[in-house]
Amino acid sequence: MARFSGLDKDTGHKARGKTGVLIMNLGTPDAPTASAVRIYLAEFLSDPRVVEIPKLVWMLILHGIILRIRPAKSAALYQQVWTEAGSPLLDISQRQQTKLANQLQAQGHDVSVHLAMRYGSPSVATTLQTMHKQGIDNLVVLPLYPQYAAPTTGSAFDALAKEMMKWRYLPALHFINTYHDNPDFIDAIAASIQKDFELNGKPQKLVMSYHGMPERNLHLGDPYYCFCMKTTRLVVEKLGLSEDDYVATFQSRFGKAKWLQPYTDMTIGSLPEKGITDIAVICPAFSADCLETLEEIKGENRHVFEDAGGKNFRYIECLNDNDDHINMMANLVKPFI
């Protein structure tokens, strides 16, 4: 609840006392065009949290090769998932924002809920400036990355700090850095899988595909892999699955470095020769469907499976703006508002 308003009678400064919730996700190009994708990739791939290569070397590679070739290819992929509402990730994130705001308001909490993307629009800086002008001095930040990772959650904090370094008056800050083992999250994931099993039958194998990262990050101390494994364990325990019923994999690798294994595409492509021709795939590291789930998993990896002899492939959607997902978000932020 708001604590006070108006002018402070002792100091004459404008009293603040408002609470704001900021949900964050990775980001998206403004349009499925090569020029828009180039702008997005330039920001994304320039983040030292994302690519840990000496800056001068990487900038030569990025601007000399990658940004000359990749934007057109990526734009073609974005065109496959773009809808009348625009970017799926942005559209879903906006719906999450609206439903979370409505739920908190219905529960009697006087808070404003905002959305920012780490890269692209709405930007972290612009969103924080808006919240600052509203007099928010109690800021609750929920990066929608279930499993902490330095390139995602860590980078989200960097963006917050970069903007707030310019502020004279800093808000109280509550930064929720991970919820990989949160009971509400585990229940929501398990419920979405169980619903699919009830509608379509239990598959021969459940593939839980997480976003990948270089294996080097794990050795440097990033807990992401361990958090993914804990999410997996808790979900399969909730569902009562046996070890043969599921496999946890990692997708979206880039470059020649060794990434976390097993790789999703190679695993899926190898299953039919083992007699597994009926699978369901879910992506528990993504809070909203996006290019990596809709094109890479639902599209590209489906073809990998079918080309290898697979018969039945189904993709279980992200939690998106499902009611139990919104309930989880509300329960995560309520202790701080």
Image (cartoon, rainbow, N blue to C red):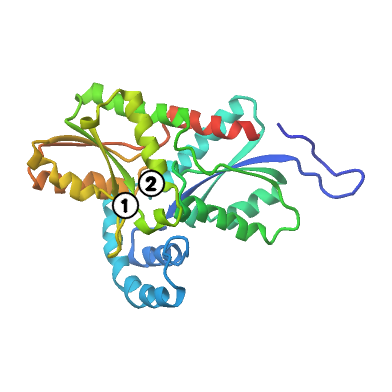
The answer to whether residue 287 is visible is no
Q: Residue at x 51, y 39 (%)?
A: 97
Q: Residue furthest right?
A: 10
Residue 323 pos. (x, y %): 44, 28
Q: Which of these two is toward me, 299 or 235?
A: 235
Quadrant of residue 259 within the rendered picture: bottom left
Secondary structure at badge 1 equals loop
In the image, which disc is placed on residue 201? none
Which quarter shows the C terminus?
top right
Q: Is residue 80 above or below residue 112?
A: below
* 11 left or right, relative to 37: right
Secondary structure at badge 2 equals helix
What amino acid is labelled 1 in the image?
A: Leu
Q: Which of these two is toward me, 329 or 231?
A: 231
Residue wearing tag 1: 260
Label 2–label 1 contact, CB within 8 A: yes
Q: Residues within 10 Å of mark 2 (few under 14, many from 20)?
A: many
The answer to whether residue 240 is visible is yes
Q: Earlier in the sequence, mark 2 or mark 1?
A: 2
Q: Residue at x 44, y 31 (%)?
A: 185
Which quarter shows the N terminus?
top right
Q: Is residue 141 above or below residue 325?
A: below
Quadrant of residue 209 within the rendered picture: top left
Residue 196 pos. (x, y %): 26, 27
Q: Which of these two is toward me, 56 or 171?
A: 56
Q: Which of these two is toward me, 17 or 282?
A: 282
Residue wearing tag 2: 225
